[in-house]
Amino acid sequence: MSVTAASGFLAYGLAAGLKSSGSKDLALVINTGPDYAAAGVFTTNRVKAAPVVWSEQVLTDGQLRAVILNSGGANACTGPAGFADTHRTAELLANALRQAQDTAGSAHGSAGSAQADIGAIDVAVCSTGLIGVRLPMDKVAAGIDDLVPLVRPDGGQAAAEAILTTDSVTKQASYSDEGWSIGGMAKGAGMLAPGLATMLVVLTTDAVVDSEQLHDQLASACRRSFERIDSDGCMSTNDTVIVMSSGASGVRPTLRDFQAALDETCHDLALQLLVDAEGAAHTIAIHVEHAASEEDAVQVGRAIARSNLFKCAVFGQDPNWGRVLAAIGTTAADFEPERIDVAFNGVQVCRDGSIGEPRHLVDLRGREVHLEVNLRNGTHSATVWTNDLTYDYVKENAEYST
């Protein structure tokens, strides 16, 4: 149940001293082949962190050997020097992996000769943490030297721990089919908004998959998972989702089967991110149905998810459907206000855009909240996931950099 669930991958994570807490902060995932197909989806924020710019470049050929990830610093808005730090990180790792070939086949499962020809251009870099701070490259370099000999087939848990920031738990998932599998890890607990989230995600598969198809399939999976969670409407500078294929199983699934597996794995990780959203007391699924188009359904769901008034009402266990209608009314979606139905946890509190069942029939004490919006104007639907707005969210973000 980790990023090493798929065969052909090694991983580990350790404390390199990037975090003042002394917690793990440097992680590594290596693809040992025989295939190295890869793809990535990144933030659409125009302010991109140096690792995002670098990783976009190295993935243009659809090939990747390894991903190095750090928490404890985003390396965003750090200028040319920050980009040079990212490039150097990739070079340091490539050098360390080449040197590790002499220890191939050791009890710890080092990278070995499979990485003898690796270069910086084969390494993606991901960073997360505070924006506007340079990374201590002496600690990064020492951490890489310590990390490479430790990577192992069962090192996924340690890697998942090393990428956490304000997360309270690790996020891991796996999917198995007949002879092949997918594994994954993610981090993220705040700034969860479309254009992905403030998250780093690494997905692995031992299926035989062509690099030409990987990007489109990853983008499709992200569109209905990571891009449908919206915690606080804030978009990060470092969002990265990377998938790598080792082909180690020798099994080539159909496009449909692989897409379904990738969709399920991404959906699993996305909901884990939302459940761990900073300070959240409720996880809210906003299902919009009978819309004129899927785009309309997503737009309506997104508007509700970004309404602080709605999110505060749910925190207070108040099924305030007026705030739902007010949010819907800000969109350009095609609907008639007099035809909208709204239900909280199965109780239709708004019918035909007016008063429905009594609010006191709704129980919002549980963690899960299901909001159903029926636009009664088409055949399309979509679900957007969000969480409530709590005192703890304000406190955590007010004190984040201190």
Image (cartoon, helix red, strand yellow):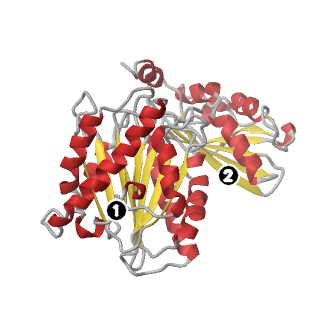
Secondary structure type for disc 2: strand
Q: Disc 1 and disc 2: Cα gap in Å?
A: 43 Å
Secondary structure type for disc 1: loop
Q: Earlier in the sequence, mark 1 or mark 2?
A: 1
Q: Viewer-proximal residue, 226 or 204?
A: 204
Lateral position of residue 351 relative to residue 71, left or right = right
Residue 360: percent from left, percent from top: 61, 31
Q: Is residue 171 visible?
A: yes
Q: Which residue in the structure is indicated by mark 1? A: 118
Residue 14, image quadrant: top left
What residue do we see at 52% from left, 69% from top?
Answer: 211
Residue 204: percent from left, percent from top: 40, 63
Quadrant occupied by the N terminus = bottom left
Name the kind of residue labelled 1 in the image.
Ile
Q: Which residue in the structure is indicated by mark 2? A: 382
Mark 1 in CB contact with mark 2 (< 8 angstroms): no
**232 to 14, vertically: above or below:** above
